[in-house]
Image (cartoon, rainbow, N blue to C red):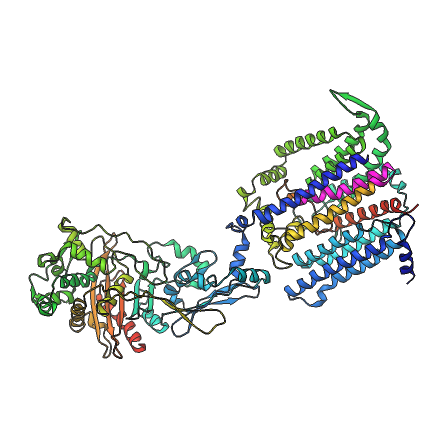
Amino acid sequence: MTRELKWVTLVALIGFGAVVLGSAFWAVVQADSLLARSDNARNVIAEQRIRRGAILDRDGEQLAYTEVTGSGLARRVYPYPQAAAPVGYYSVTYGTAGIEAAFDTQLRGADRASEWQDFVNDLLHRAPQGSDVRSTVDLDVQIAAAQALGSRSGAVIVAHVPSGRVLAMVSQPNYDPNRLDVDWATLTRDEQTSPLLNRVTAGQYQPGGALQTVVLAAMLAGSPDLQQQGGYMLNSEVPEATTSVQVNGLQLTCLPGTPAHPLTLAESYLFGCPAAFARAPESGLTPGNLWERFEMLGLLASPVLTGFATGTVNPPPLLHDETPDEELVAALTGQGDLTVTPLQMVQVMAAIANQGNAVPLHLVDAVRAPGSSDWVPLELPARRPALLRADVASAVRLTMLQAAAQSPYVSQARTGDLVVYGHSALAYGGPQATPYVWFTGFADVTDGEEAEAVVVVVVIESEDDPALAAQVAGAALATAADLE
Amino acid sequence: MADRAELRTDEFDLGGLPAPARREAGLLLVAGLIILVNHIALAIVRDRPWTSLWPVGVWAVCAIVGHIVLNRRLRWRDPLLFPLAMFLTGWGLNLIDRLVPSYAGRQTLWLVVGLSALLAVSLLPRDLRWLSRYRYTWLSGGLLLLAITILFGENPSNAGPRLWLGFGRIYYQPSELLKIVLVVFLASFFADHQRYMRTDMIRLWRWRVPSPAFLAPVLLMWGVCMVVLVWQRDLGTATLFFVVFMFMLYLTSGQALLLLGGVALLSAAAAAAFSRIDVVALRINVWADPWATADSDAYQVVQSLMAVSAGGVFGQGIGQGQPTIIPVVHSDFAFAAVAEEWGLVGIITVVVVLAVIVVRGMSIAARTRFVFRSLLASGLSMMLAVQSLLIMAGVLKLVPLTGITLPFLSYGGSSLLTSFVIIGLLLMLSTDERMPV
């Protein structure tokens, strides 16, 4: 029987050997692929242990921070849901958005991790610590803008020139990032309201009358010597300036309250009369020039916000000499194929306020490693290309200043002795051609040798009173100007 | 002091075998230290008071008492079996206190009961003829207990197969006792008939196989067990019995062909069960492709594989992994919990310890001159080996999962009690073989 015993023992030992090999297969060979599976709850638990860094406003107020629960898991807290558009959200289930998404690597500490550090942390089961991120948002401006917009749907963006700091970014309807997991189904159900869509960075709006600033700049740029001819161009009478323009079944008119007397080009701009701009080719503006201006001012590319991944934009069909008249008129009145985001429009305003030069728009300016008190500034693009000639920017600026003085709408953005430059406009969007109102402008806040300004872009959906947008802009500008 | 003097002289015993006492004490000390360190680490990780170390204290008392009693009763026993069994049991206490702290008290109590049973076995007459002589009595008793379970059985969790008999808050699984009874019966029956089984052959085509006259009653008995167990849906135990039975038949008859026949029978039974019994179909489908139903039927198996992966080579450390994601991890999936928190190193340790226990058991079988004792030792060792292999391989997706416990490590009083009785019997069998003439 000894021989049989040996065989049976050998079979048992082979079995034990197979168990060891099987274990090694799963524990070593297949380990990475199994750990990477989306249904591996360990990933969720590991994610929940990460102590994400805080997101602060420019004065150090916490806009988002991490709270550790009794079970050692982290919970993200957002004390100011009004700041949801710039801050975004962080959810183990639904991912990230806003600064939470753009600076995810820093916030979760992945940027500082070395293999050795990872090994030590893993060995000691230390919860990963992320860096703090300082945003450029000013909570006071943010709250003032949000309150001024109220429950109306739309977007507000406020930025400082020439630094490019975004002081406020409001997208309405808003959501409470603290309740994201609970409210997800409701938040994603209604495509019409889309609370999760950041209307400032991703809302595609028909520019309508707001494009008049760009067309005006293009018309002025056509003149080689604005010192001599600029005043003449702006102040010469435009024949039949107040007539309406037919575009895609829409009848575009001047804003309500436009005086009955003949209007100059500047007056056409400040009363939002489309005819003067629809007939721009008659005064020498070629489709090629207009297209070039769109391109230069960043209306054909994704909006640039330093540190943020920008989506792709499908540019409208190229404008050229063969473009049919109706299409050209639609393009000139902002009711064509070109749509813009408020972020793109703020880029344009910033360039006008900044002598035609581009401004590096950014929402985050520094990162601080955990346990450190030193903020490391974020690198901004060094190149500030000229988007407009300085004399063109200056002429547009003067026209906008005139608008603030004379337009019954733009003037509503003025508070106290604040010097405001602005433009009010109407646009029609969507299949129902719902009207909405734009305000684009800025206030001079120069407090030294260098010119400084606060630019603002407001768009309110389903409204036809441009004064509303101007009032919202005024509230935001007043708060921002006080602080700057 | 007297003991020490005695031990010292034992080292120069006439049989050339070192006395087991010192080796056993040394091994118990090492095992105790490992268990203590693990429990201290658990207390630190979980921020528990020092008083939470009491299960280690009970374990130490059991180890000392067991060592002393065994020294008196079975002086020439195998020196590895008791400490290795105690090591795994202590590790099991670490594990259960970590996975389901509320069960730690009960498992510790079962350690005391199991050790008492082991020591009680050591007090019985050493020649074990009483075991062999009343084989039909033991088997009838075992089957009667099983019949009672079928009629009055319950499940402590009020769900799943009703394999337990309840006595107040204490539950016992009679099929565990049947493991020992079956091995005793088969060993005794085969021992009586071995000579004829090896000589009285019939021709089947080109092969010679033992006469069916000897196999018929065995197959009948086995059939009864199988029917009962399949009826109870305790497929793990049914497979275990069948495999152990086949090995014992092979040891007795020396016919390797029978093993092949056994494999064929098992495959046929599996194929039949696959089409007729839902549980079997489910287990086999899950084994074939767990990823397809990773969030439903195969959840447990997939999560257990993820636990093994999460453990890697060195493990996460006690209390630092997430093995509790696996449902019922403390019972059927204790091995996966070991893998996650102690890693491949822990797995190899468990496998080596179990393999050493089995090899020691088989060597006891090889050394004895009596067929019954040899079959008993090998049968009990194979019972431990096959049970360990079935559950470990099931957890690792090497074979379909059968819901049985990992000896010594898993939570479960009946299983621990049975394993300790097996160790007690093996210690007893080893004593006579090692005793110097």
Query: Residue at the location (68% across, 49% down)?
Result: B348
Tell which of A122 and B407 is nearer to you. A122
* x then y, percent, for residue B268: 66, 30
Task: Pick the quarter of the image with the N terminus of chain A.
Answer: top right
Query: Residue at the location (7% across, 61% down)?
Result: A240
Q: In this view, does A443 lie to the left or right of B307?
A: left
Q: What stretch is highlighted in magenta?
A: B366-392
| Image-quadrant location for residue A347 | bottom left
* x then y, percent, for residue A302: 30, 57
Task: Pick the quarter of the image with the C terminus of chain A.
Answer: bottom left
Tell which of B7 and B196 is nearer to you. B7
Note whether residue B329 is visible.
Answer: no
| Image-quadrant location for residue B214 | top right
Residue B386 falls within the magenta-colored stretch: yes
Tell which of A384 and B78 is nearer to you. A384
Tell which of A259 and A162 is nearer to you. A162
* x then y, percent, for residue A59: 39, 75
